[in-house]
Image (spheres, rainbow, N blue to C red):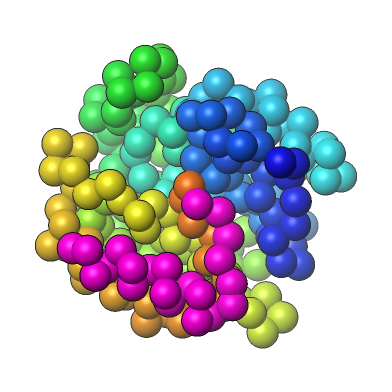
Amino acid sequence: MKPSRVWKDVYIIGSSEISHPYDCSVYLVDAGELLLVDSGAGLSFDRLVAGMKLLGFDPDRVTTVLATHAHIDHIGSLAAFRDKGAKIIAHCLDAPAIEEGRGVAAEAYGIDYAPCPVDRRINLPEEVVAVGNLEITVVHVPGHTPGSVAAYLDIDGERVLFGQDIHGPYYPEWGADPVTARDSLQKLIDLKADILCEGHFGVYQPAPAVERFIRSYLDTL
């Protein structure tokens, strides 16, 4: 697979099939400035940069990286992007793990993690983040980790939801809370997204397919 457009100004540039087997799905939003949602496990920074270039984007325009939660496969390249000038956004409950490198599940992958400062902490149930000419709403969805977040934006009549790891796993030893996850998954359903950009399983659309995917995991909890 190669990096590709999801919808209008939204692209997928990384995944286990695109950038590295350990990577989550990494999404790019062109808002004049570039926003990344997650950063892979840390072994694919150069491939993510190459993917941007393949799509015609200058990696130096990445100003913001939203970390959906503090697991290594999502935060591994945060420090590398921050070194290039990007601002890192994460929820306040997962920020300590991102900054200290403890509890990020790096040992499960057998790779090292470079701790990274968080420039903006999400504290509210919902916060609007302005990036370039777009506004993206970040939503606290605890369950997979205490500080898991999703995010959505509306582009040309379509609601695009970056749903993070809807599929879980919901293992308490990795910081999960299945009870809290039920409420969070219902919250994501209630957003009525037209396009879902999931944390590992790629893109689902239209709206009925999005709801079916989320509900399939809700029903197992």
Residue 162 against residue 219 in the figure, above or below: above
Task: Tell me residue 120's x, y (percent).
Answer: 43, 48
Task: Tell me residue 14's x, y (percent).
Answer: 62, 40
Give me the residue at 35% from left, 36% from top: 71
User: Magenta segment range?
Assistant: 201-221
**Number of disc labels:** 0
- The residue lying toward the viewer, choosing from 17 and 91, is 17
Q: Quadrant of residue 67?
A: top left
Residue 88 against residue 8 in the figure, above or below: above
Residue 184 against residue 117 in the figure, above or below: below
Residue 181 left/right relative to 43: left
Give me the residue at 67% from left, 75% from top: 155
Task: Tell me residue 158's x, y (percent).
Answer: 63, 79
Residue 191 against residue 147 in the figure, above or below: below
Give me the residue at 75% from left, 37% from top: 51
Give me the residue at 48% from left, 73% from top: 210
Residue 116 left/right relative to 57: left
Residue 72 left/right relative to 195: left
Quadrant showing the C terminus: bottom left
The answer to whether one can see residue 163 in this image is yes
Does 123 appear in magenta? no
Q: Quadrant of residue 103?
A: top left
The answer to whether one can see residue 78 in this image is no
Quadrant showing the N terminus: top right
Task: Tell me residue 208's x, y (percent).
Answer: 50, 81
- The residue lying toward the viewer, choosing from 52 and 134, is 52
Residue farthest toward the right in the current orientation of the protein:
56
